[in-house]
């Protein structure tokens, strides 16, 4: 289960054109914004302004992760598949762009643990949501000459790969994740707070149905 801050919530401007659907996503490309200001939604807005000023349709990434681990929607999906981003030449056509806000070259920002945990969670979600059996995780520098995503973040990608288990692993199914979040929510649930418990149970049931491929059912999340 991931919470994504939608474009309307962070104040996105309209795109300057149409998005192109990514037909067969195979992995993700990790970026950093190389920018010191990174906590507020204003940072995401500024990135969109910059990228559109370069003649791009919109912000170049599919997702952006703030310093505190909030996941923001970048380019929206096109008919249930990611939109092709703009950043890494041909590699963008099959890989989802994820940008961690901050400058992770030596001597600048440090990667926050919440931000890194959000990256792992988002990678797992991408693998499950887009049915990618072995999600490829690369840094921008693996595809073209650039310092991105910064030496510090690039060094952490091996641990990210290790943490993003294969989607067919029994410990990585959306059901396990939903049950785990339900159990974790347990101590927070008190008499008089049934709605929270019911929503947690609802999310859990939805994940089970989703996992079983019952996607045609007339259900929606809260
Ligand atoms: Zn990059």
Image (cartoon, helix red, strand yellow):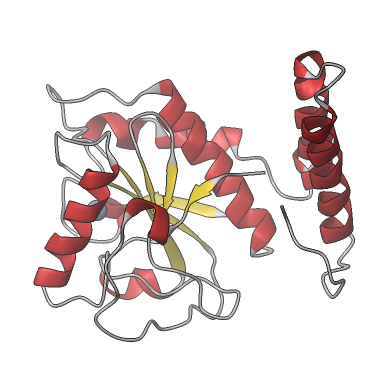
Residue found at x 32% / y 75%: 90
Residue lying at the far front in this picture: please name it. 192
In the depicted view, which residue is nearer to us: 143 or 114? 114
- Tell me the quarter of the image containing the N terminus: top right
Quarter-of-image position of residue 108: top left
Toward the viewer: 181 or 158? 181
Q: In this view, does 189 lie above or below 85?
A: above
Q: How many labels does the image show?
A: 0
Of 111 and 75, the residue lying toward us = 75
In this image, 22 relative to 183: left or right?
left
Image location (x, y in percent) of residue 115: 41, 31
Residue 94 relative to residue 153: left or right:
right
The answer to whether residue 187 is above or below residue 37 is: above
Is residue 133 visible to us here?
no
Name the residue: 83% across, 31% down: 197
Please, which residue is most extreme toward the top here?
A: 187
Q: Position of residue 114 (x, y in %)?
A: 45, 26
Residue 94: x %, y % from top left: 46, 71
Residue 44 picture location, percent across and down? 26, 50
Residue 213 placement, left or right of 164: right
Say if residue 167 shows up in the picture: yes
Quadrant of the image occupied by residue 107: top left
Q: Determine the residue positioned at 44% across, 31% down.
A: 116
């Amino acid at each position: 289960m991931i919470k994504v801050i939608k474009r309307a919530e962070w104040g996105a401007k309209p795109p300057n054109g149409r998005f192109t659907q990514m037909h067969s996503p195979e992995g993700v490309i990790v970026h950093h914004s190389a920018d010191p200001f990174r906590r507020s939604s204003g940072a995401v807005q500024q990135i969109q302004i910059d990228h559109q000023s370069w003649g791009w349709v919109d912000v170049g990434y599919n997702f952006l992760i703030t310093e505190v681990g909030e996941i923001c929607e970048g380019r929206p999906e096109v008919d249930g598949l990611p939109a092709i981003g703009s950043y890494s030449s041909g590699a963008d056509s099959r890989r989802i762009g994820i940008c961690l806000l901050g400058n992770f070259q030596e001597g600048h920002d440090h990667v926050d643990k919440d931000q890194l945990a959000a990256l792992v969670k988002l990678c797992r979600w991408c693998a499950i949501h887009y049915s990618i059996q072995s999600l490829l995780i690369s840094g921008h520098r693996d595809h073209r000459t650039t310092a991105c995503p910064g030496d510090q973040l690039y060094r952490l990608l091996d641990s990210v790969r290790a943490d993003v288990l294969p989607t067919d692993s029994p410990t990585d199914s959306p059901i396990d994740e939903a049950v785990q979040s339900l159990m974790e929510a347990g101590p927070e649930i008190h008499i008089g707070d049934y709605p929270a418990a019911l929503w947690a149970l609802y999310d859990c049931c939805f994940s089970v149905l989703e996992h079983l491929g019952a996607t045609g059912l007339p259900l929606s999340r809260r």
